[in-house]
Image (tube, helix red, strand yellow):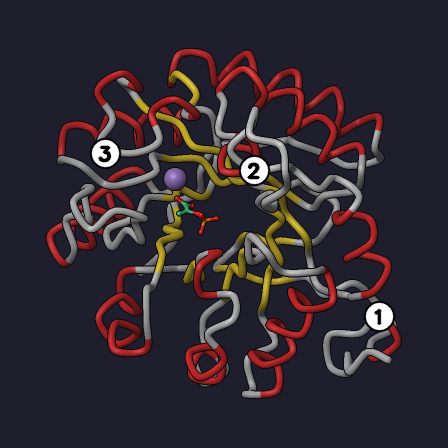
Amino acid sequence: MSDLKLVARQHKEHNSVIQVGQETIGGKELCLIAGPCAVESEKQLFEIAKGVSELGIKFMRGGAYKPRTSPYAFQGLKKEGLKMLKRASDECGVKIVTEVLDTSLIEEVYPYADILQVGSRNAKNYQFLKELGKVDKPILLKRGMSSTINEWLLAAEYILLGGNENVILCERGIRTFDTSVRNTMDIAAIPLAKELSHLPVIADPSQGTGKRSLVTPMSLASIAAGADGLMIEVHNEPEEALSDGFQSMYLDSMKGMVSVLREQAKLSGRTLDLEKIRKEAV
Ligand code: PEP
Ligand code: MN
């Protein structure tokens, strides 16, 4: 027996469409979120932000606070990184998706983010999920790397129950016995989550595979499976990246990738129009 209530498909007649300024997530137009794993420098971030916005991609990702397996690995530029994201957002017109690591950082990250990302490692941090229910901005909720689909949806239930209905589910691969990929991308989770819930579901094939060459095929598979969007890591110099360079797309290859995705979008009854970025009145 599942305890799904507010997130359950039966709870709402229509798919939830999340409004982020003038953009929507969960409608006919696919949502693309592209950007570096981590904010590393002004130069890195602005080059990527320009590249991404020139393609008409509306959302840029970039971690300022990074959850790293090793405490010796790059932990992010923290507040400095958040400020860089804001400047890039103002200058290039991209909306910002950035991770919030715990309850104590919600207040700090909030003003800099258009969507708050909750990482795989926090997908079972129930007290934190309750706090996110009080936030009045959309939450991008990654699937825990060892969460069942039901556990992932129940994590979203915590946020909705707290009062925040704007949750975007993100499949990012799970741990299996297979070590030839960083994670096993669970493509079936996409249509199943959409069957069980009215919330938008996007896919992150970068964390989902850990391998650049697999990102485009898994993006296509995700769109074919009904994903409402994709979160893709991209870097101006992947070889120099301070985290996840091996799974980051080259900025130069994004244009080609977008045209391939557009064709798949059409086949799936979706659009990927990527009209020019509209600067919003502030
Ligand atoms: C990321 O998006 O860079 C990340 C750390 O993701 P996840 O929480 O899915 O591992
Ligand atoms: Mn990453």
Q: Where in the figure is residue 277, as x and y percent of width and height?
A: 44, 37
Image quarter where the N terminus lies is bottom right
Q: How many marks?
A: 3
Q: Regarding mark 2 in the picture, which secondary structure is present there?
A: loop
Instruction: Please name the amino acid that badge 1 sits on.
Output: Arg
Q: Give how far apart the Cα atoms at labels 2 and 1 are.
A: 28 Å
Q: Give the numbered dot on residue 183.
A: 2
Q: In the rendered image, which residue does mark 1 sit on?
A: 9
Upstream in sequence: badge 2 or badge 1: 1
Q: In the rendered image, which residue does mark 3 sit on?
A: 45
Q: Regarding mark 3 in the picture, which secondary structure is present there?
A: helix
Looking at the picture, tell me which residue is in the foreground, 98 or 104: 104
Upstream in sequence: badge 3 or badge 1: 1
Name the side, left or right, on which 64 lies relative to 8.
left
Q: Give how far apart the Cα atoms at labels 3 and 2 are.
A: 26 Å
Instruction: Please name the amino acid that badge 3 sits on.
Output: Leu
From the image, state whether disc 2 or disc 1 is nearer to you. 2
Q: Where in the figure is residue 176, as x and y percent of width and height?
A: 63, 42
Upstream in sequence: badge 3 or badge 2: 3
Q: Pointer 2: residues within 10 angstroms few (<14), some, or many (20+)?
A: many
